[in-house]
Image (cartoon, rainbow, N blue to C red):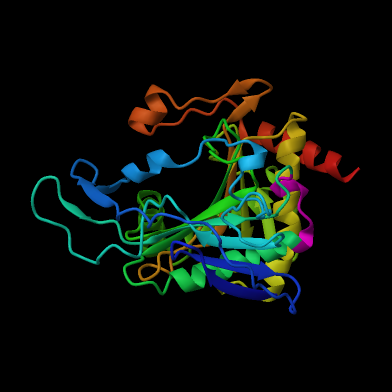
Amino acid sequence: MKHTSIRLADGRELIYFDEADDAVRASVDQRDLAAPPAPTQLRRDPLTEEWVAIASSRQGRPLLPPTSECPLCPSKPDYFTEIPADDYDVVVFENRFPSFSTSAPIEPASDDYPSTRPGVGRCEVVCFTPDHESSFGRLSETRVRTVLAALAQRTAELSQVPGVEQVFCFENRGVEIGVTMHHPHGQIYAYPYVTPKTRQHLAAARRHHEATGRNLYADVLAAEIADGARVLARNDHWTAFVPAFARWPFEVHLAPHRQVPDLAALSDEEREAAAPLWLSLVRGFDALFDAPMPYIGAWHQAPVREDRELAYLHLQLFSIRRGPGKLKYLAGSESAMGAFVNDIPPEESASALRAAMQATLS
């Protein structure tokens, strides 16, 4: 695989990840673009000790543009997009409407109320395919491996950016989830702090390790494999399962058998083995109700600097759809209190997903 970095008209970086080693990328961004927006501001919530990004420039981002105006498609002679080339395999570029930016200065938080600091970091868009009408589930295994290689490379690179504390790779799919672009794509956030969810996971992992000397997620994975009732698929390197504690109607974890902190730490063999299972899970989601499934695919990775020995890389794939024409809304209990109630028992969900995944193979 070959990757080539160029600069867009406003100075943002774009990287082509080509499956052919002899690919040549000479196209130039011909647009006349305004300078990137000013850096965002982080404000600390003293009630939760969490940071909130105030990113007003994101109000101007496109909202579900028609195919003819999609900024993630290849450029054409009569319409220039974010990708200058007329074709590509996988492309990663700096988001034009970022929540965090490397142009922000690295400064300590202020002591007043509200406590603030610049929103240093980086936000990137990952285009999986030039085909606007495609989806992740329709990619080839080769293309999914290219996506994984790109995510691993970006994780390694972004982990070296000054001020970045955690790298999060994810895909939002479906208008029900809130996507603003139909084109198949994911995103990467390089945060200037360790996210609340990761801190919660690490705190539990630390307590478990102090009590047992073992890794918490490794014990969860071992217990799910031993039980087997919620296991969906396995190969030599990975296991996919519905966790017994699933809070979403349809939720799957895909975890490597070896504890690693992030995608960059996977071996070539592990990345190769992850692709068919990841693809099978997404296809199973779409087959479940014979309709495109809204979902979030979230790669949980270790922080850049702290508690890496406690973390355990895994993909969490989940949907808010609980049935045909039915969505799970996060109302009072979930949104205000963070207390989830799942309508579908995980064992039932696992059985339905297994059948749906099998149907995609026939």
The x, y position of residue 51, in whole percent, is 27, 49
Location of residue 361 with respect to 35 vertically, above or below: above
Tell me which corner region of the image, top left, top right, bottom left or bottom right, holds residue 192.
bottom left
Residue 40 left/right relative to 204: left
Q: Is residue 225 visible?
A: yes
Residue 94 is situated, as x and y percent measured from the top left of the image, at 48, 60
| In the image: residue 84, left or right of residue 214 | right
Please say whether residue 298 is visible from this viewpoint.
no
Q: Which residues are magenta?
A: 134-142
Q: Is residue 140 magenta?
A: yes
Give the residue at x 58% y 32%: 175
Q: Residue at x 56, y 73 (%)?
A: 5
Viewer-proximal residue, 298 or 163?
Answer: 163
Compared across the picture, whether 288 is left or right of 193 comes to right
* Residue 322 x/y as whole percent: 62, 26
12 versus 335 height, above or below: below
Residue 202 magenta-highlighted: no
